[in-house]
Image (tube, rainbow, N blue to C red):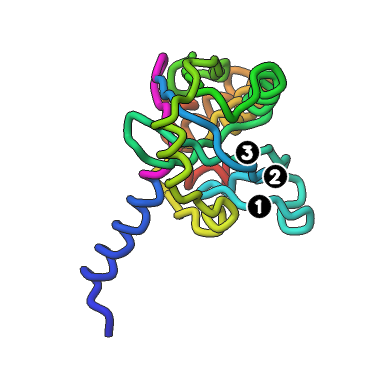
């Protein structure tokens, strides 16, 4: 019989290491500089309230999928190959940068513009400096992450935030209701504002 504490420790290490390889820009003006490496992995996903799942038309009937794009991203400051992920607008900006500069010769600075939960949050992608021989050698020696495999091992996270696009959809739908109906909605979930809604409440909401 597996000891519960041992199992908890193993899961914590697994999920911690998985989260650690992802580039996280959580706050306004957070930045990272690095190089895009290899091919992108794209998929359509839906948020279940606890995790992202690959969109299945039959299983997720009535839900609107969103695009997620993953790329290996070498960060010289950490001397580590990480994974960066974005959505539709981010991919369009990346494609413009790729067409103008190419991706193999440059380090790029990515900056978040927008606070947490801000529906207008966007990310800039700008060339930072050309990749020198030392960084090129480090990139060549670094092992690429199996992006598809990572999507099959995304941890369930009931403590995570509801994605911005889901919050935006709630705001749009609530704006069509009367003030009294909006107040009933908030009271039902014992929240004062929409941002306080918990992921596990999302399906019922």
Q: Mark 2 against mark 3, which lies toward the viewer?
A: 3
**Left-right relation of 80 to 42:** left
Kindly identify which numbered label has been placed on residue 69.
3
Classify 10 Å Cα crowding around label 2: few (below 14), some (14-19), many (20 and above): some
Residue 177 in view here: no
- Indicate whether residue 29 is drawn in magenta: yes
At horizontal 70% and vertical 50% (from top left) the residue drawn is 55
Question: In 3D space, how far apart are the residues under numbered discs 1 and 3 (Cα atoms)?
Answer: 12 Å
| Figure quadrant of the C terminus | top right
Residue occupied by mark 2? 44
Report which residue position mark 1 lands on. 54
Looking at the image, residue 18 sits to the left or right of residue 56; the answer is left
Q: Is residue 92 left or right of residue 145?
A: right
Where, quadrant-wise, is the N terminus in this rendering? bottom left
Q: Whole-Å distance between the Cαs marked 2 and 3?
A: 9 Å
Q: Percent from the top left, x then y, of residue 54? A: 65, 52
Question: Visible in this render: residue 5?
Answer: yes
Q: Position of residue 166 (x, y in %)?
A: 60, 33
Q: Nearer the viewer, residue 165 or 10?
A: 10
Provide the major secondary structure of the magenta segment: loop
């Amino acid at each position: 019989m597996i000891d519960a504490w041992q199992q908890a420790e193993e899961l914590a290490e697994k999920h911690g290491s998985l989260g650690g390889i992802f580039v996280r820009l959580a706050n306004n003006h957070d930045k990272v500089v690095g190089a895009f490496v290899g091919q992108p992995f794209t998929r359509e996903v839906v948020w279940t309230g606890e995790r992202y799942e690959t969109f299945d038309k039959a299983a997720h009937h009535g839900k609107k999928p969103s695009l997620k794009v993953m790329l290996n991203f070498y960060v010289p400051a950490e001397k580590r190959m990480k994974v960066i992920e974005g959505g539709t607008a981010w991919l369009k900006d990346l494609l413009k940068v790729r067409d103008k500069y190419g991706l193999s010769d440059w380090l790029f600075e990515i900056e978040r513009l927008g606070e947490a939960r801000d529906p207008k949050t966007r990310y800039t992608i700008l060339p930072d400096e050309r990749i020198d021989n030392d960084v090129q050698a480090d990139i060549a020696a670094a092992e690429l992450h199996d992006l598809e495999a990572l999507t099959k091992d995304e941890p369930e996270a009931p403590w995570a935030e509801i994605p911005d696009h889901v919050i935006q959809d709630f705001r749009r739908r609530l704006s069509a209701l009367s003030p009294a109906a909006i107040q009933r909605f908030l009271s039902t979930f014992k929240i004062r504002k929409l941002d306080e809604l918990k992921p596990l409440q999302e399906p019922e909401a």
